[in-house]
Every structure is written in structure tokens, then in C-alpha cells.
Image (cartoon, helix red, strand yellow):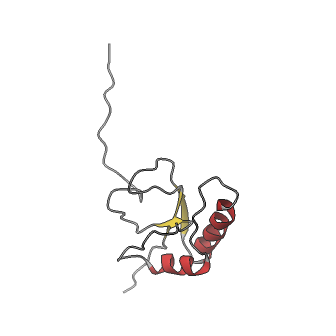
């Protein structure tokens, strides 16, 4: 008989402790302060789409979500759906800033 034990795998991707990708919550939530090392795309999205105090799933929430997703994509970012919310990543969607490619 073989018993399966849960594997202790390291976190991969953007939704890892420490926010390695510098994600922006979509839509921005009213009353939350921006991070000190916030990516410039996050500030531009907040400038285009005002923060909301609407609860996720409410009729007032969806227009703000749609506008912030469109702003993220227009700025060259990628939208990430968060299926496993945590204390560090409470939002359902995040904008991942574009990767800067350095040329020599």
C-alpha cells in the first residue's frame, strides 16, 4: 500500500510572499495606501480608474473592475486571476506590470 504525503513545494509565480512581481490589485480599493515601491503602472491605473469601496460581486463593483482591467492591458500589463486569496493577496484580480527587457 502506498500513501501519498503532501509535497512541500516552493512558491512559483507572482502570487508569492513578498510580491515578487509588484502586482496592483484590480480594482483599487478605497482607503488602501499604495506601496512605497509601487510600479508606475499601478499609479497610472489608479489615475484612470478611481478606487472603489464597492463589495466584490456587487453591481457597483463590476464597472470599476472592467475599467481597471482595460487600463492594465492598455498600459502593457497582464491580468492575473487570484483563485486562492490570502492575507497578502486579498483581491480577486491583479495587474502584473510588463517585464522590462534590458538591452546592452
Q: Residue at x 59, y 75 (%)?
A: 50
> Is residue 59 or residue 25 the one in the foreground?
59
Residue 18, position as x, y percentages in the image: 32, 62
Q: Quadrant of residue 37?
A: bottom left
Can you say whether 90 is above or below 72 in the image?
above
Residue 40, position as x, y percentages in the image: 46, 81
Q: Quadrant of residue 45?
A: bottom right
Residue 79, position as x, y percentages in the image: 56, 63
Can you say whether 24 is above or below 48 in the image?
above
> Is residue 42 or residue 5 the one in the foreground?
42
Q: Residue at x 57, y 64 (%)?
A: 53
The quadrant in which the C terminus is found is bottom left
Q: Quadrant of residue 33?
A: bottom left
> Is residue 31 or residue 5 the one in the foreground?
31
Q: Residue at x 38, y 57 (%)?
A: 88
Q: Is residue 94 left or right of residue 10?
A: right
Q: Is residue 93 left or right of residue 35?
A: right
Q: Is residue 63 left or right of residue 26?
A: right
> Is residue 25 or residue 8 the one in the foreground?
25
In the displayed orientation, state which residue is furthest to the bottom: 104
The quadrant in which the N terminus is found is top left
Q: Is residue 98 left or right of residue 21?
A: right
Residue 87, position as x, y percentages in the image: 39, 53
Can you say whether 70 is above or below 85 in the image?
below
Amino acid at each position: 500500500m502506498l500513501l501519498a504525503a503532501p509535497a512541500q513545494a516552493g512558491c512559483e509565480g507572482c502570487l508569492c510572499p513578498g510580491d515578487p512581481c509588484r502586482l496592483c490589485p484590480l480594482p483599487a480599493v478605497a482607503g488602501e495606501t499604495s506601496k512605497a515601491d509601487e510600479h508606475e503602472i499601478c499609479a497610472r491605473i489608479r489615475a484612470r480608474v478611481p478606487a472603489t469601496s464597492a463589495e466584490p460581486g456587487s453591481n457597483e463593483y463590476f464597472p470599476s473592475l472592467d475599467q481597471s482591467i482595460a487600463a492594465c492591458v492598455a498600459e502593457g500589463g497582464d491580468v492575473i486571476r487570484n483563485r486562492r486569496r490570502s492575507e497578502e493577496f486579498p483581491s480577486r484580480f491583479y495587474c502584473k506590470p510588463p517585464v522590462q527587457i534590458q538591452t546592452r
